[in-house]
Image (cartoon, helix red, strand yellow):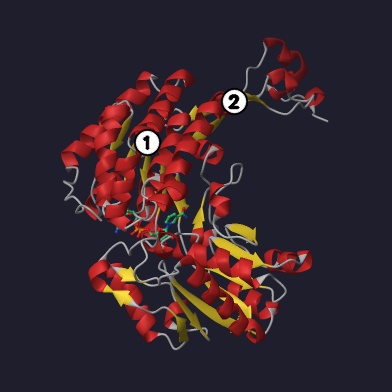
Amino acid sequence: MSSMAPELKPTTFEEIDEIYSTLNKTFRSGKTKPVAFRKVQILQLAYLLQDNLERFKEALAIDLGRPPLEASFLELDSTISDCKIAYDRVDKWARTEKAPFNIKFAAFRPAIRKEPKGVVLSISPFNYPVWLSLGPVVGAIAAGNCVVLKPSELSPAISGLIAELIPKYMDNDVIRIVLGGVPETTKLMEYQWGHVLYTGSGRVGKLIGVAAAKTLSPISLELGGKSPVVIDPKCDFKIAARRILWGKCANAGQTCVAPDYVLVPRSSEDAFVRALKDVHDEFYPSGATTTPDLSRIINLAHFHRLKNLLDSTSGTIAFGGQTDESRKFIAPTVVKGVKDGDSLMSDELFGPILPIMPVDDVDEAIAYINAHDHPLALYCFSPDAAFKNKVFDNTQSGSAVANDVMVHCATDGLPFGGIGPSGSGYHTRGFSFDMFTHLRASIDSPGWIDNVLGARFPPYTSGKVAS
Ligand code: NAD
């Protein structure tokens, strides 16, 4: 890591007032409505990323110790791809849609106009500070809105870079960045917004939900939680272990859809842990403590939170467990024999620690999942359709992924969102466009229709009784 994280000057309340008023003026002027205008802004966002890839990688290394390759494939490539997809498809997305034909209503020429919601707000977290900040901006702009982005104060190198580059590449009357933490976000939430997208923890999500209710601002919540993995003893342990450990180690486990814990049949626990150890040694041949291929924990508070959870577990550390406060480093750690009620099973871990909880059978695994909050993702490794169906048909989760982890977020055509405590609403690509779009019902009723529907007008004489 070459440089230090910058000290960012928070946006003042006066500046926030000015931003809100400028963006509302712009929206009312109609500037953002032509699709051609939106496409230029989307293209500019793609150039912003493309021209500055090295600076983004550097900033991700400063904030998260992110290895450059991981920076590319985990979020820089996805964000550029989101721009390309929106650019190519926005004409189609924005087109007014005719309602399905129904002879009773056809004369009204019913149609759905895809209209921007107005000035929208996106509040983003630290863990994927590029994709989760700029991805929603693509959707908001594609839908014809003005947008305020409040990136995380915990990833200052990226947030500062975004704040520096956005005004250079994009229309400053249409998109603005607000820097800061709790006071600035609280101030932002006093305004009425066309839509608020909040991505972050459920704890803060509740506060944002309450604040949005006060102004009746529509809201989508993209939250987190403990995403379980259910293991069928018939699955290929090597493949399952490789994918699960990758999901746990990418970005040092600080991923909202990281596999949080594994439910494995008691009789297979040791064999599965051995497979994880083999994969670990393949990933980090000279040891995990010196590898350049692991990100760091975002700050000391989260480092100590994770260390305390590890120190208090009643499970057995199968491998890993090394920590280094000076580097905010936690080695990939597998803890076996973990029981319900363990320190590692209370909250979303958000770190490279993988608890293995042995269960008697798949029924016990399902019962455990159902006794807790609906997760953001539910993973199941099995070659058997009946096993997978049993797990997915008897549980609820934001997404249901068989034989892989995390890749569904980047898969074109799929919505990304939670259910209940893991969130509400859907985003990414076309679903982000939909989230920031108002479906405006429209009718254009011809005069002659009163010859057919004249009975609706008083006086309601007996001859007018409807059939
Ligand atoms: P966080 O909730 O601490 O912060 C998110 C945002 O909220 C930041 O911009 C922050 O400035 C703001 N904020 C923090 N406290 C606030 C308060 N009291 N009042 C108003 N605003 C406040 O989340 P985080 O630690 O940055 O991110 C980690 C969490 O985000 C995890 O739970 C993870 O699962 C979740 N997450 C969810 C998704 C998803 O798409 N579902 C994606 C990434 C992360």
User: From the viewer's perspective, is 161 left or right of 359?
Assistant: left
Q: Is residue 374 above or below residue 22?
A: below
Mark identifier at residue 325: none
The residue to which callout 1 is attached is: 49
User: Residue 56's image quarter?
Assistant: top left
User: From the viewer's perspective, is 463 left or right of 21?
Assistant: right
Give the x, y percent position of residue 88: 54, 27
Could you tell me which secondary element the residue under label 1 belongs to? Answer: helix
Residue 191 seen from this side: no
Mark 1 CB near ligand 1 (8 Å cut): no
The residue to which callout 2 is attached is: 92
Quadrant position of ligand 1: bottom left
User: From the viewer's perspective, is 44 left or right of 449?
Assistant: left
Question: What is the crowding at mark 1: few (fewer than 14 residues within 10 Å), some, or many (at least 20)?
Answer: many
Residue 179 seen from this side: yes
N-terminal of the pair, mark 1 or mark 2, is 1
For this rendering, which residue is in front, 191 or 48?
48
Question: What is the crowding at mark 2: few (fewer than 14 residues within 10 Å), some, or many (at least 20)?
Answer: few
For this rendering, which residue is in front, 174 or 219?
174
Mark 2 residue type: Lys
Q: CA distance from mark 1 to mark 2?
A: 25 Å
For this rendering, which residue is in front, 218 or 292?
292
User: Residue 111's image quarter?
Assistant: top right
Mark 1 residue type: Leu
Residue drawn at x 30%, y 51% is 152
Give the x, y percent position of residue 30: 39, 19
In the picture, the quarter occupied by the N terminus is bottom left
Residue drawn at x 43%, y 41% is 136
For this rendering, which residue is in front, 51 or 310?
51
Could you tell me which secondary element the residue under label 2 belongs to? Answer: helix
Residue drawn at x 45%, y 50% is 74
Give the x, y percent position of residue 446: 67, 13
